[in-house]
Image: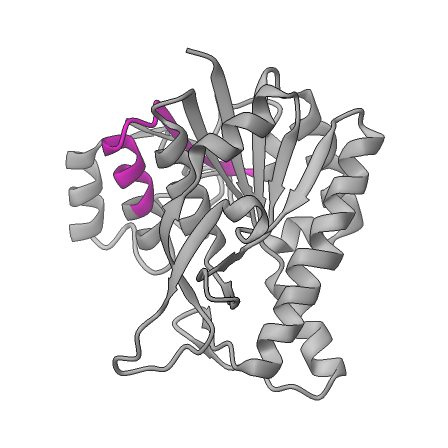
Amino acid sequence: MNKLTIVKVGGKICEEPDSLAQLLRDFAAIEGNKLLVHGGGRSATRLAERLGIATKMVDGRRITDDAMLEVVTMVYGGLVNKNIVAGLQACGINALGITGADMNIILSDKRPVKTIDYGWVGDVKQVNAEALKALISQGVVPVIAPLTHNGKGNILNTNADTMAGETAKALASLFDVTLVFCFEKEGVLRDENDDSSVIPVIDRNMYAELKQQGIVAGGMLPKLDNSFATLSAGVQSVIITKASNLSDLSKGTHLV
């Protein structure tokens, strides 16, 4: 089976010119089939502020009302996505910037209102693996913005980690998939204040212990839950690492 590397990169890395330039060079150097999923939250917050639109976050998730949906669609699907695509073309990579609505790649349901109304936020329902495979088999590198659609004409703001995980699961039957989550730390740390305390390998039993001891907490929990779910669905390996380590995937934390 052909190899496919799916890289999820946080908005902060995509939004700083120096870190973006290095990311694009390192991503371009990955051999074989590849796909990039990106964030862009800080740019959305900055533009919203300039437009006089208040940003409301609950547990790190953006409340997306009508005005904020316009902002995230412009920023994620336009500004951030096309900057990445143009940068990859300059590195000789034939990139195509898309949202989940393009080619019906990712269909979502609008998140139901329970205690919180998140507005136009989507929960991924299905990924069109065959459409992505068709692009990849033509040598195209998809660059996916964190937007999906509901099939009823609405764009939905969707968590980029979730989109990367669901895309990896859907493509696992067609490719030998490695999923790489890039963020600001060296990997999963035993001590969040010590960058040298990377835990090189975590299996399910160890993860349960780390959770129980409170070593892994906060925003890392959904990332790891998400990652182990992709392994159960047939993804070959999941790596959590610093974006600057993309050229050496032996570093970081490997989930097995």
Question: Most extreme residue toward the top, as rendered?
Answer: 1
Magenta region includes residue 238 = yes
Give the magenta part as a residue range: 226-242
Asked if residue 93 lies in the magenta stretch, the reply is: no
| Residue at x 16% of width, y 43% of height | 209
Q: Residue at x 51, y 68 (%)?
A: 154
* Front-most of residues 209 and 70: 70
Residue 253 lies, in percent from the top left, at 40, 32
| Residue found at the far front of this picture | 152
The picture places residue 206, in percent across and down from the top left corner, at 19, 36
Q: Is residue 173 left or right of residue 196?
A: left
Look at 34% across and 60% down and name the residue there.
218
Give the answer, above or below, for where 115 lies relative to 100.
below
Quadrant in which residue 51 is drawn: bottom right
| Quadrant occupied by the C terminus | top left
Query: In the displayed structure, does residue 25 sit left or right of residue 118?
Result: right
In the current view of this chain or complex, which residue is farthest to the right? 90
Q: Quadrant of the N terminus?
A: top left
- Residue in front for this viewpoint, 117 or 183: 117
The residue shown at (57%, 33%) is: 35
